[in-house]
Every structure is written in C-alpha cells, then in structure tokens.
C-alpha cells in the first residue's frame, strides 16, 4: 500500500476485537500486506557472499511463512502476499531514503509490492551478524551491484517509518541482546512516530534445516490474532545443539502497550503501541547460544 | 565471543574430534553392537569412502529404535473441543460461534479463553483472554488517565511457584489432554523474562519474570519427533496462561520406524550428503536419530526414521559472512 494508515487501522481492529472475532477480521481486512524474503543463493555472479552460504531452506521457510496468509487471502481475510527471493531481495528494498547518504547506496524501501516499508508484515530468512559496540545487526543480501550493499545494517540502512509494523527475522544474531542494550534497534529502525513496533529475531546463532520450515509455518498460522511475540519464542526455542535463543523486541510508549502487542497482538490485530520512545526485549532467562553471550539471569 | 568461550569451544572441538575418531574406529572395527542386523556393507572393516572427510560424532546415534510404536498414544479425537476445554481451559462461558481462520483452523472465543484448534494439523492454541484487547494506554497529552492503575493482567504478579511446580502443573494438563509417558521426550523448564530500555536510558531495567514455560518435546522410542512440542505457560502466581501445542496423532500403520543400516553406512551416506551440500571438508558434524512426520488426510501423521546430521556454525565469522548451525536428514528407514 502506498499511504500510511497502520496505527489507525490497527486501532480500529483492536476496538472491534472486543466485539468478536468476525468483526475484527472485517475491520482489519481493509488492506493487509505480507512480503517474504528468502535469500538462499550466494557466491554466484551478481550474488553476495560465497557458495558456502547457499542454503535452499531459506526460501522454503519463506514459502512456509507465506502459506497461511495465502490461504486467508483466498477466503477474503487477507489482502496481498508477495515473495521476493534471492536476487529480488536486495539492499535497496531494505534502505530508507533518509539513510541513503550514510550508506552511499540506493534507497527504495517503499517500492510498491517490493520494499519492506511498504508492507505491514515482513519475514526475512538469510544470514546475519552483529556488533555490540558500535551497535548494529546486519543481514546478508541476495544481489550485488552498483548502489547495492551485500549486508543491510540496522544502523546504515533500515528505518521503518512508512508502513511496516512487524518484522520476523530468521537470521543469526539479528536480535542480539548487547546490541539492543546499546541502542541498536529501536533507536536505529524507528522514529517516535514510526508505525513499526515489533522485531522478532535471534540472539546469537540460530540453527537451520527442515525443522525451521516446520516451526515457521506453524508460527505464521497461529499468530493472526494472538501471541504474535510470545508464539515466536514458543516455536523457535531449540536446544538440540547450542541453544537457539529467539527474542521479541517491541517498541512503544509504555510497558503495558508493548506487552499487549507481544501477548495479544497478531497479523490481523497489530496493536497500537503508541510512540516509539522505548522498547522491551522478551527472552528466555539464561539461554546460551553460540556467537552471543548467555542471556541474563538476573 | 570472549576469550574464555573461544578457548572452551576449541577444547570442546578437540574432544569431539578425538571422540569422533575413536567412535569411527570403533564402529568400523565392530558395528554389530549398534545395529539390529548389519548389512554386508556394514560388516566391512575398511573406511567407507568419504567418511573421513568429516569428523562425525556418532555418540548420540545409539542402537536403532524398534519397529513398533509404544502403546497409549494420543488419538485424533483428543482435538475435539470438549477434550481441549477440559484439559486446558476448564470451562467455557459465553461461547461464540466458531470462526474459520485457516484451511482447517477454527477459533472460538469465550468470556475467559480463546481456543484455536486445527485437528488436521494436530495443533492448538488455548490462551486466556486478557484486557489487552482494549485500547492502548493513553500517552501524555492524550485523553485518558495516564496514572490509572494498569489492568491487572499487566501488573507484575507475585511469584508463588518455581520451575518444578510449573512443570508439575503443566504435566497434569498434558496428561489430561491424552498425552502419555510413551511419547513424552525431554522437558525444558524455562523462564520468560523481559527488560525495558526507556527513552534515552543508558542501561536496561532489571530483569523481570513474565512467566514459566514448560516445553514438552515428543519422543517415540526415545527418538525425537520433528515439529512436535507442547508449551504450557503459567504466570508466576501459578495460574495457567496459555498452551501452544503441535502434537498430531501418529497413525498405527505406514510408519518406517527403524533401520538395518550400520553406523559406517550411515556415516558414508552422511558424508556424501554434506559433500553435495557444499559443506567444507573437515567440518565437525554430529549424528542422531530423528523422526520426520508426514501428514495424512485424517489428521494423523506417519513417521519416518532419519539420521539427522548437525553441523555447527564456524568458529570465526567475518562481517557479512556465514554463521549458521545446519541440520540435514540422511534417509535410513526401511520400506514397509
């Protein structure tokens, strides 16, 4: 969609929720867009990184995330779905025009049906890394070339100030605790008036395989109305090897508003959290991944 | 990664490499202790082509599981609304008509609970309804009373239980639902916590306990079933908050629960798979059994045994580089 209506629309949906599920659906279905970005191919001509990074599962999970939305679209409860994989997932679509100078790169995050800040909900599966100080997380991109970056960073590229409400990031180190504590997400990817309110990601490395396709599809299907943050933690935690430590970082004006979205929000009920002046990180006490500190216990 | 952690990981890597070499040698010399019926290939004593390219840790690859299911497994009928309510909600009052919210997923709202059921996927989400569905808190300068007490659901609750009590309470629920010991695997007792970073504060607030989460993973004959878990969440005061469940019933027929392949044959297949996937030679890898479920039209699943190969993330990762523990599946199951 091209105009920002997020908070008002979700506000209406939230009011309607008290009256019953069907009313919520009707109110919220005015315009809802999801876009998924599966970046699986690396190391080839015009691609980023090296061939070791190639992993086809990344597009499989993107497809799994999209599927429940497509089903709801067929019964009139969701408006638009789009999949932008590999070379279609490039840094310009992750870059806000206000940061084009900082990154010396092309900014096109509101490109219709392509840019992240033009959707309401996005899912990204790629590789990631982080720095605690200076604070940032980066996501590996699917295309190299003039004006493009092979790593889109929270500090240099991203600022969701147009339409995006919720981002789900399946990438290692995409929600690092120390990066958050040092001001790495809210302060970089929102402004006070941004609609953007939830960044579901991982502290440390996160494992990848067919099990991810399974839980990502489940997470998408069960999060249309409730638990959009809490479901992410319930689904993505794993301890088969080193721990997988999902986190949910929620931006908003008060703890109650942020927790309200974490527990009671969904894709069709993206609860208004108010001004993006503060954030709350939700995580599992003592979770211990590779490439990240053991999460605090007190 | 700090120095101590890196040092510990190097030591762990050395231990794994040593133990893997020992295990490979042992299994090549005599694999009969770990297989039900070694094949001709499994009886060879010479190294299998490619297996030495990867230092496999096979210590978690015990004897193959038996070809039979345990008794008393969950039935599809457990997902009927009445059973779900008695197990995870108690009672329903003021129930609204179910609404379809997916291919086979429906939602029901009562005064106290929201119940989403998907019997064909073996999935549930039962969550206590909260006043969070009212408007957001007013901000300074907006109509409303900012200083009003928060709704009780958002107030911090007194901590009256601990991990063990939360686990016991959760086990009562899943047992009442119909999940028996025969399909319960490892249990994780976790605490969901939160911290705030307010305005321009230099440091986060103190860690606050939100809830206790007990995660039941599923295992059949000791082998984990991919995608199956129940997460039961209690508030710190012991009240049940929500249950998220993926636990499809297992069909009585059509499962492929065991294998006759020897460990050397499995490692040979695993090495070939990792090579095809472009995993660098010399990468550490561990093997374990796993069941992959295949959905059937009636809501049941059939299980197929695989050997799961876990490759940890590289120790050193440059900016924009690769850091991802990966898991692959090696087909090992016998045909019906």
Image: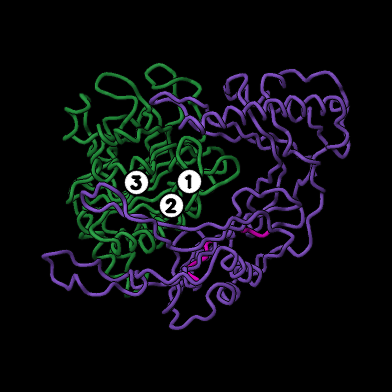
Q: Which residue is mark 3?
A: A167
Q: Which span of residues is magenta-colored?
A: B240-249
**In the rendered image, which quarter contains the N terminus of chain B?**
top left
Q: Which residue is mark 2?
A: A283
The chain containing the residue under callout 2 comes to A
Q: Is residue A136 magenta?
A: no
Q: Nearer the viewer, residue B123 or A75?
A: B123
The chain letter corresponding to green is A
Nearest-to-viewer mark from 2 and 3: 2
The chain containing the residue under callout 3 comes to A
Residue A18's place in the image compared with A123, above or below, is below
The structure residue drawn at horizontal position 33% and vertical position 69%, both measured from the top left corner, is B132
Q: Colour of chain B?
A: purple
Q: Say what secondary structure mark 3 lies in.
A: strand
Ranked by sequence position, the earlier of labels 1 and 3 is 3
Q: Residues within 10 Å of mark 1 (few under 14, many from 20)?
A: many
Instruction: Evaluate whether label 2 is on the same chain as label 1.
Output: yes
């Amino acid at each position: 969609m091209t105009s920002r209506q997020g908070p008002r629309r979700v506000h209406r949906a939230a009011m309607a929720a008290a009256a019953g599920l069907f009313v919520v659906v009707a109110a919220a279905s005015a315009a809802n867009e999801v876009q998924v970005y599966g970046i699986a191919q690396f190391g080839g001509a015009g691609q980023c990184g090296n061939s070791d990074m190639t992993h086809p599962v990344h597009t499989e999970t993107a497809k799994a995330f999209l599927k429940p939305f497509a089903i709801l679209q067929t019964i009139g409860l969701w408006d638009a779905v789009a999949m932008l994989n590999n070379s279609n997932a490039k840094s310009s679509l992750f870059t806000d025009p206000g940061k084009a100078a900082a990154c010396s790169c092309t900014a096109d995050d509101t490109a219709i049906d392509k840019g992240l800040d033009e959707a309401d909900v996005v899912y990204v599966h790629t590789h990631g890394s982080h720095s605690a100080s200076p604070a940032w997380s980066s996501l590996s991109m699917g295309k190299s070339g003039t004006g493009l970056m092979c790593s889109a960073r929270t500090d240099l590229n991203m600022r969701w100030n147009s339409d995006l409400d919720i981002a789900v990031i399946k990438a290692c180190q995409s929600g690092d605790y120390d990066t958050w504590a040092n001001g790495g997400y809210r302060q970089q990817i929102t402004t006070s008036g941004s609609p953007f309110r939830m960044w579901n990601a991982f502290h440390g490395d996160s494992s990848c395989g067919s099990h991810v396709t399974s839980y990502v599809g489940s997470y998408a299907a069960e999060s249309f109305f409730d638990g959009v943050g809490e479901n992410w933690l319930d689904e993505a935690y794993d301890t088969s090897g080193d721990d997988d430590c999902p986190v949910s970082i929620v931006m908003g004006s008060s703890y109650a508003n942020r927790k309200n979205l974490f527990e009671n929000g969904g894709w069709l009920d993206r609860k208004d959290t108010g001004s993006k002046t503060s954030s709350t990180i939700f995580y599992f006490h003592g979770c211990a991944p590779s490439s990240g500190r053991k999460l605090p216990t007190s | 990664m700090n120095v101590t952690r890196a040092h510990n990981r190097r030591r762990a890597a050395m231990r794994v490499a040593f133990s893997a070499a020992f295990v490979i040698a042992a299994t090549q010399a005599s694999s009969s202790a770990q297989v039900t019926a070694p094949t001709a290939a499994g009886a060879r004593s010479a190294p299998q082509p490619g297996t030495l390219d990867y230092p496999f840790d096979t210590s978690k690859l015990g004897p193959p599981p038996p070809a039979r299911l345990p008794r008393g497994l969950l039935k599809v009928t457990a997902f009927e609304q009445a059973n779900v309510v008695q197990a995870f909600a108690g009672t329903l009052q003021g129930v609204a008509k179910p609404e379809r919210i997916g291919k086979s997923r429906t939602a029901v709202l009562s005064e106290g609970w929201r119940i989403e059921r998907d019997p064909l996927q073996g999935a549930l989400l039962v969550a206590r309804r909260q006043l969070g569905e009212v408007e957001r808190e007013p901000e300074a300068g907006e109509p409303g009373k900012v200083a009003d007490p928060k709704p009780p659901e958002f107030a911090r609750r007194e901590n009256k239980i601990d991990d063990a009590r939360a686990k016991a309470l959760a086990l009562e629920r899943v047992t009442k639902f119909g999940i028996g010991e025969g399909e319960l695997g490892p249990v994780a007792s976790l605490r969901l916590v939160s911290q705030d970073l307010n305005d321009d504060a230099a440091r986060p607030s103190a860690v606050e306990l939100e809830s206790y989460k007990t995660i039941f993973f599923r295992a059949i004959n000791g082998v984990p079933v991919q995608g199956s878990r129940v997460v039961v969440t209690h508030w710190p005061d012991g009240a049940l908050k929500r249950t998220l469940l993926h636990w499809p019933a297992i069909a009585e027929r059509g499962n492929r629960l065991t294998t006759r392949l020897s460990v050397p044959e499995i490692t040979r297949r695993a090495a070939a798979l990792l090579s095809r996937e472009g995993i660098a030679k010399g990468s550490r890898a561990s093997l374990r059994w796993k069941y992959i479920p295949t959905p059937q039209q009636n809501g049941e699943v059939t299980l197929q045994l695989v050997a799961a190969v876990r490759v940890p993330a590289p120790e050193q990762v440059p900016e924009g580089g690769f850091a991802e523990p990966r898991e692959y599946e090696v087909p090992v199951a016998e045909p019906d």
